[in-house]
Image: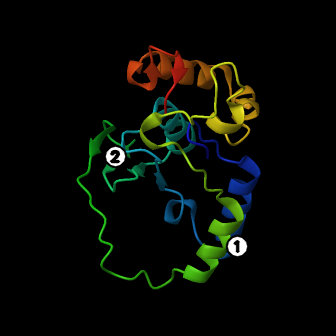
Amino acid sequence: MTCVSVRFDDASVADFFDAQVDLGKKPEQFARIWLHSHPGDSPEPSAIDEMTFERVFGKCQWAVLFVVAQDNETYAKLQFNVGPGGHVLIPVEIDYSQDFGPSDHDLWGTEFAAHVNATEWPDEGKRPENLALDDDPSSYALPYDFLDEFEQMEPQERRFILDELANRPELWNPESEVMCL
């Protein structure tokens, strides 16, 4: 998952399903809830989230889409496809006061260190003083290979991102015409 898209790796999902079935479980026992996080302060599912949820879970009798945002705001939708079908939003909150017994904090820390790269972003959206307008800001503004990821997206995913940026004028500084994140 990136800050702008999500895609299930079909081979990994198939491997997971195989492993669970080998343990004697039925898909309805392990493939009904999609829980993920958003890096910003909005737990609202994106259009990509909704399309993915429909594609992956749309044939289940029931399924849950759950999103937690960076500030612990949550969104949870129960979708059911029996009877008349429909969906309902579920009020939820996260209780961090209890330890989750099966969690392996050491393994989580190892995975985090291996797969998450911290990036220092400027305070209050200001560009560094040593970055002139004609300098190439890509190493500063996009510390990971965003353009390669962007090019690998489906055309409708790219259009969604561009439309979102176009509809968010607060992300643009009109004086310098430089995107401020």
- Amino acid, disc 2: Lys
Looking at this view, name the residue that lies furthest to the left.
Answer: 91
Number of numbered markers: 2
Name the N-terminal-most of marks 1 and 2: 1
Q: Viewer-nearest of labels 1 and 2?
A: 2
Q: Which residue is mark 2?
A: 77
Residue type at tag 1: Asp
Secondary structure of the residue carrying tag 1 is helix
x, y percent for residue 104: 56, 82
Residue 104 visible in this rendered orientation of the protein: no
Callout 1: few (<14), some (14-19), or many (20+) C-alpha neighbours within 10 Å?
few
Name which residue lies at 41% across and 50% down. 67
Residue at the far bottom: name it.
Answer: 101
SS at circle 2: strand
Residue 47: x, y in percent? 47, 30
Q: Nearer the viewer, residue 133 or 28?
A: 133
In this picture, is 162 found above or below 1?
A: above
Residue lying at 48% horizontally and 56% vertically, measured from the top left: 32
Rendered residue at 57%/65% (across/down): 26
Q: Which one is nearer the viewer's eye here, 117 or 176?
A: 176
Q: Position of residue 117 (x, y in %)?
A: 66, 56
Indicate the position of residue 100 as horizontal and vertical percent values.
Answer: 42, 80
**Mark 1 → mark 2, Cα distance in angstroms:** 30 Å
In-image side of 57 versus 78 (left or right): right
| Image mark for residue 22 | 1
Residue 146 image-quadrant placement: top right
